[in-house]
């Protein structure tokens, strides 16, 4: 009764601020028009109807890419079923539409805001018999509405950092109620399982199945495409700074300027995390008087210092072109991003120390001497210079990275079996 009252207050407050949330998206759409498109879907108005479906929610681009092998396997083995994949961000939406372009039984929509009437409208349109949520994107009304309509909810590839667990512990009564509405949780590690159990999750509803992010395919033509692109640069040394955030690009650019003083034949491929920042980063590069070419404009790559990768969906290609990979979101307090993509390509990996989103992966890579942490621009420049001057060290670190990657595969089949069991 108390929980339902709290949820009612939460829903009421969410409803009151909803106009401002929509306004914020419209303001943000000045830099990324995706935020003003298909707004009606966020209110539960789906432009199609399904007699029955399997609902899969992945928040943004990274999660959408990670769960894609599982979704494709399910859709291929169950062609009679329809799948609805929801996301929250325009980048995630674009990625989903690209990933499943050839699947007629996979549909896409933005997830509605977490308000009961909007969720009920959405569910009425797509009629899910099962809801699969990627990682830890749980919302009180989503769980409550699914429970009321007897829709099983599975949390796949779940992770729970100590930092997040401490936060949930402050609202333990609410957390326990929400966890009780989950049908099953498949976690990445035993530490994750312990944290969920400490918060009140029933032990027999948890399984430890590994991280599905290790189980992604590599395109057969990746190596040849990477070689062709690299040849256009005509540079001896190439490094990539991937998924960088505001406040991080300045550090990266300063490190590159320092590196150029020692190794002038070096190129930085800079990949900002958010598309709305592409122009801002281009201006930042220009202000530092560095020669830059933008990939989206197909500009000349002759005699450049920076290659600004302002396109989407090409991260693996850009990693493959590079000799060394720095993974962003880690020099600022964002928790880091996926280190497994460069690991799969045997690249030595550098990162800042904020890696709470990938703590388990980072720990394994560091233990294998495949990952080096840096804290500021001068340290980053020094480490890069060493890896370029001593390529044998870079090769050893890259080799260690791919060993970690290969040793930790297998979560895909385990998570597929879990989903199948709930669909039988």
Image (tube, grey):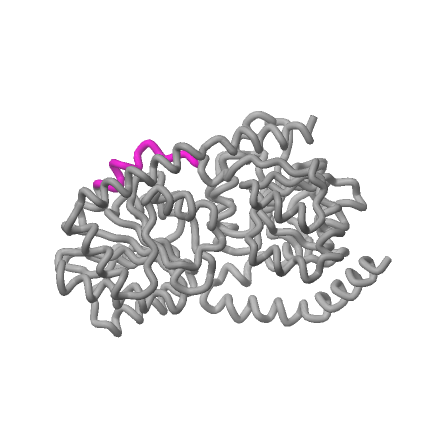
258 vs 207, nearest the viewer = 207
User: Residue visible at 21% across and 44% down?
Assistant: 393
- Quadrant position of the N terminus in the picture: bottom right
Magenta span: 216-227
User: Residue visible at 63% across and 72% down?
Assistant: 20
The answer to whether residue 409 is left or right of residue 414 is left
The answer to whether residue 155 is left or right of residue 347 is right
Name the residue furthest bottom: 287
Q: Position of residue 381 (x, y in %)?
A: 23, 61
364 vs 55, nearest the viewer = 364
Q: Position of residue 283 (x, y in %)?
A: 31, 71
391 vs 304, nearest the viewer = 391
- Give above or below for 92 relative to 251: above
Residue 287 in sight in this render: yes
280 vs 369, nearest the viewer = 369
Displayed quadrant of residue 85: top right
Q: Is residue 60 magenta?
A: no
Q: Position of residue 236 (x, y in %)?
A: 14, 50
User: Residue visible at 39% across and 51% down?
Assistant: 312
Q: Position of residue 217 (x, y in %)?
A: 41, 34
- Give above or below for 11 relative to 91: below
- Give above or below for 399 relative to 284: above
- Quadrant position of the C terminus in the picture: top right
Residue 120 in sight in this render: no
């Amino acid at each position: 009764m108390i929980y339902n009252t709290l949820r009612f207050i939460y829903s009421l407050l969410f409803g009151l601020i909803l106009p401002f949330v929509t306004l914020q998206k419209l303001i943000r759409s000045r830099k990324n028009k995706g935020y003003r498109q298909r707004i009606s879907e966020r209110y539960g108005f789906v432009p199609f109807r399904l007699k029955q479906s399997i609902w899969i929610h992945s928040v943004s681009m990274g999660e959408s890419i990670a769960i894609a092998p599982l979704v494709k396997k399910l859709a291929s083995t169950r062609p009679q079923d329809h799948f609805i994949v929801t996301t929250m961000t325009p980048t995630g939406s674009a990625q989903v539409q690209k990933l499943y372009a050839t699947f007629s039984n996979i549909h896409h929509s933005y997830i509605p805001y977490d308000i009961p009437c909007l969720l009920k409208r959405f569910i009425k349109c797509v009629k899910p018999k099962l809801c699969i949520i990627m990682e830890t994107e749980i919302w009180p009304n989503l769980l409550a509405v699914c429970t009321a309509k007897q829709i099983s909810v599975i949390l796949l590839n779940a992770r729970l950092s100590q930092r997040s667990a401490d936060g949930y512990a402050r609202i333990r009564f609410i957390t326990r109620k929400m966890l009780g509405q989950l049908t099953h949780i498949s976690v990445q590690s035993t530490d994750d399982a312990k944290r969920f159990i400490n918060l009140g999750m029933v032990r027999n509803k948890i399984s430890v199945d590994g991280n599905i992010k290790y189980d992604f395919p590599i395109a057969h033509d990746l190596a040849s495409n990477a070689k062709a692109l690299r040849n256009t640069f005509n540079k001896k040394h190439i490094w990539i700074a991937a998924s960088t955030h505001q406040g991080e690009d300045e550090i990266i650019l300063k490190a590159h300027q320092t590196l150029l003083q020692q190794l002038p034949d070096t190129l930085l491929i800079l990949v900002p995390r958010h598309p709305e920042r592409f122009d801002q980063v281009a201006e930042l590069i220009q202000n530092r008087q560095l020669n830059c070419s933008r990939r989206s404009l197909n500009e000349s790559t002759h005699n450049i210092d920076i290659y600004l990768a302002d396109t989407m969906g090409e991260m693996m290609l850009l990693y493959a072109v590079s000799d060394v990979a720095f993974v962003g979101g880690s020099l600022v307090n964002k928790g880091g991003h996926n280190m497994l993509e460069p690991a799969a390509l045997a690249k030595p990996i550098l990162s800042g120390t904020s890696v709470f989103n990938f703590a388990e992966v980072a720990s394994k890579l560091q233990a294998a001497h495949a990952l080096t942490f840096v804290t500021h621009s001068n340290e980053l420049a020094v480490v890069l210079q060493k890896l370029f001057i001593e390529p044998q060290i870079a090769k050893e670190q890259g080799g260690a990275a791919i060993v970690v990657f290969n040793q930790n595969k297998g979560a895909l089949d385990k998570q597929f079996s879990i989903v199948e069991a709930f669909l039988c």
